[in-house]
Amino acid sequence: MPKITATFNKGYTTNYEMTYQKSIWTGTPSMKSYTLSNFRQIPQIQQLSEEKQFEMEVVGNVLPFKVNNYVIEELINWDDIPNDPIFILTFPQKGMLKPKHYEQMSTALKNNADKKEIATIANEIRLQLNPHPAGQMELNVPKLKDGTKLYGMQHKYKETCLFFPSQSQTCHAYCSFCFRWPQFVGMDEMKFAMQEGEQLVQYLREHPEITDVLFTGGDPMIMKAKIFSKYVNTLIDANLPNLKTIRIGTKALAYWPYKFLTDSDSQEMLEIFKKITSSGLHLAFMAHFNHLNELSTDAVKDAIKEVRNTGAEIRTQSPLLTHINDDAEMWAKMWTKQVQLGCIPYYMFVVRDTGAQHYFGISLVKAYDIFKKAYSSVSGLARTVRGPSMSATPGKVHVLGIANLKDEKVIVLRFLQGRNPDWVQIPFFAKYDENAIWLDDLKPALTDKFFFQDEMDDIKQINPIEDYPES
Ligand code: SF4
């Protein structure tokens, strides 16, 4: 069992009287979650003004909100409120709702509207927030040969299939920017969930082009080891010649590293990882780290070691977010730290066109500038990272740079992944636009339309959906 010697609140002096769990981080911590129903019990929150607490309540009634004691006590610097990046990452902020939506919900709460009315208003607002960006609900839903639709899976790119186990539709804490937010707010008809590992295996058999299965959610590492092992065993026992890699998309290392250290089934989980790697499959941990501060505790460092000791590789990714990490120096330090800890920097994403994009979004030109500054100041080993990248409807689009072509200033782009694999790597150009924050905002340069536009329109014809997010 690793020794954990995390210091309470990272040694910050605090004026708040802590009423609970001061010393648990040196033992076997148990997770305590806070949501809209009990966040006012958090001692640090009680120190904030009633106005600020009400703002959180307004936003928390629309967007998902969950935080835990590790994030509160170990990651947030309460002497730096309201600017602390992890506070903004996990606690609802007023600006996350557009003024008219904020007004709508705050009026309802002030008028003591009943639960049903609040839920109706919340759902009305949510439906205006592009709950399933990039055509997730229809375009990516795969079918078995017998016509069965697999709503717990997505197959957008040829080699990789996303799998959403029904038991992983939550996380250890919620990120305020998260594009998976509809899954956490009780909009059941929008959930991706599938119980049957068998159906996954059948789909993989029918699609020999798939080499990678990505377990996602929510956070698959919220699952108990016993449940996770069922899925893994089904996959390993199927002995699929095409399957080469199991990926796990998770933020557990950042939000609850004890999952791999001291939780009652932590060793069992690590054994499953070993089973995967010793079966000859590659195990890729796609770890979400949004800020350097998430790498600051001894617990996260120990957890990274434990996971790597199983033979898994940890690749790191994060969106670029105003208010949280729009700082080149921080990214450079974060990537350098990740390499030092044995992780592989993988992606800087552009925040998606859903939820609170207006609050967290960054223009593509600024994102490129931050990426370039950070990238050019780290060693070659950290330059495994790619970005800024948008997961848009036609594919994963990489902003390569700014250039002058025939005296016209353009943004240079390429597909890292495309709905049609033939689109990958072909450079294409958009008119320079300092305000564009997503592919939809860009206009083609030098031509009337982007080279993939006609084919993309055909794909949409075959898979019509309502309220299609344009891109
Ligand atoms: S951990 Fe991942 S899925 Fe969960 S809220 Fe954060 S970004 Fe979303």
Image (tube, helix red, strand yellow):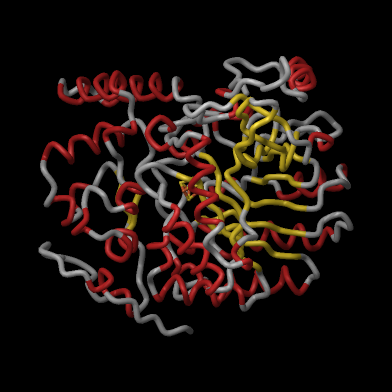
Q: Quadrant of residue 108?
A: top left
Which residue is farthest front?
407
Q: Position of residue 107 (x, y in %)?
A: 20, 20
Q: Quadrant of residue 8?
A: bottom left
Q: Which residue occupies 65% across, 29% down?
A: 393
Q: Position of residue 444 (x, y in %)?
A: 66, 21
Check the image and report above or below for 184 versus 123: below
Out of 297 and 126, give the one closest to the viewer: 297
Residue 227 in view here: no
Residue 305 in view here: yes
Check the image and report above or below for 290 versus 440: below
Out of 291 and 66, give the one closest to the viewer: 291
Check the image and report above or below for 151 versus 292: above
The answer to whether residue 40 is left or right of residue 74 is left
Q: Position of residue 18 (x, y in %)?
A: 15, 65
Q: Which residue occupies 43% across, 63% down?
A: 256
The answer to whether residue 429 is left or right of residue 181 is right
The answer to whether residue 178 is left or right of residue 148 is left
Quadrant location, the C terminus: top right
Q: Which residue occupies 59% across, 54% down?
A: 249
Out of 383 and 226, give the one closest to the viewer: 383
Check the image and report above or below for 424 versus 287: above
Q: How many marks?
A: 0
Q: Which residue occupies 77% across, 21% down?
A: 459
